Image (cartoon, grey):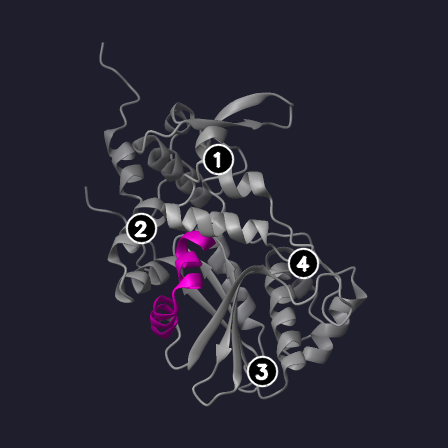
Amino acid sequence: MTESKDTYGNVRLPLVPRDILQEHHVFEVGDTRFASCARLLQSLWRAGRGLAAGRHRGRDGRLRVLGSRLDPADARRGRNFLTPDIARLARRAVAYREYGALIDEQRLWENLLSSQPLTFNLFALCQVDEERRHRLFERLFPGFFGKVEKLAFEHSPGRGDPRYLGDYTAFDLFVSGTCPDGRPAFIAIEVKYSEDMRQPGRSGSARYRELTRACALHLDPEAPSLLTGHLAQLTAEHLLAALIREQWGQGAHGLFVTIAPAANREAWYAVELYRSMLDRRPDGVSFMAIALEDVIAAVSEAGDPDLSARLHARYTDFSPVHRLIDDWQPFTED
């Protein structure tokens, strides 16, 4: 069948019939259209590799099979990661996490839908390979770095530190190095997969309102929507990036980046709304959003087509979901 496309040219994902979702143990009432398809894709990816489904304890207290969850035995073997090397690097990062880092280990090891293992699958190999990280970040951000020196997962410059946000906000990945002219440079990255970007608001925090005024990132620093709903996390992390640049010195070059799948409409709605509220001054910490598909393509262009193919099959190739829709036969002839 010819694939349907949305107004942005992306392949339109289906509203998957409940029968199919239940058959694959991935029917979740609160899922968005993208999250539903992504959860089903993860279940199909798991089953195709002979991995057992895990269980999830619902609000009623009962355990049930969940297709987008790994069985604990497979989780302990690092099967939420695309290669053994990535699994080893993730295990090391967790063991040596920053003080106060909020890492939900069950989610990291067992939850196939989580953006935490996705972040490691995308970038962990760059942590130990200087040439690899230079090639990849030059592909993604041409001319930004002269040298990429360090990658830190689940990073914050100071959890609870009043010089910053005073809370536990952190970046999924923090990349530091130098500009081509030798100035210090960093890219702070937030990775999303199925999330709809809604987070608890920060409107009750006097520190946040103080910072929206002082950092001058937004056209209207008093806008209530900056600290609520879809925009709360984007605002918080952008402010944190601006404070890091301030601590590093005004000569530092900083960039705040969000990565999300092109078909995650809720994530991109938040991105576009946030962009519309920014004061695009050339001297501030800029905001940038990149489609997950483009990052995966850059992994191939930077010299690792095998990992790129694995990432695509795992996260962005929805052809197995489309085939289920095409083959679905809910009725039988008498």
* Residue at 44% in and 36% down: 77
- Measure how far apart labels 2 and 1 are at the Cα level: 24 Å
Q: Which of pointers 2 and 3 indicates the residue nearer the eye?
A: 2
Of label 2 and label 1, which has the lower sequence position?
A: 1
Compare marks 1 and 4 and give the one earlier in the sequence. Answer: 1
Looking at the image, is mark 2 or mark 3 earlier in the sequence?
A: 3
Q: Which residue is mark 3?
A: 284
Residue annotated with mark 1: 76
The numbered disc on residue 228 is 4
Residue depth check, mark 2 versus mark 1: number of the one nearer the observer: 1
| CB atoms of marks 1 and 4 within 8 Å | no
Give the magenta part as a residue range. Answer: 119-139
Q: Position of residue 302 (x, y in %)?
A: 29, 67
Q: Residues within 10 Å of mark 1 (few under 14, many from 20)?
A: some
Q: Of marks 2 and 4, which one's residue comes earlier in the chain?
A: 4
Look at the image and tell me whether residue 159 can be seen: yes
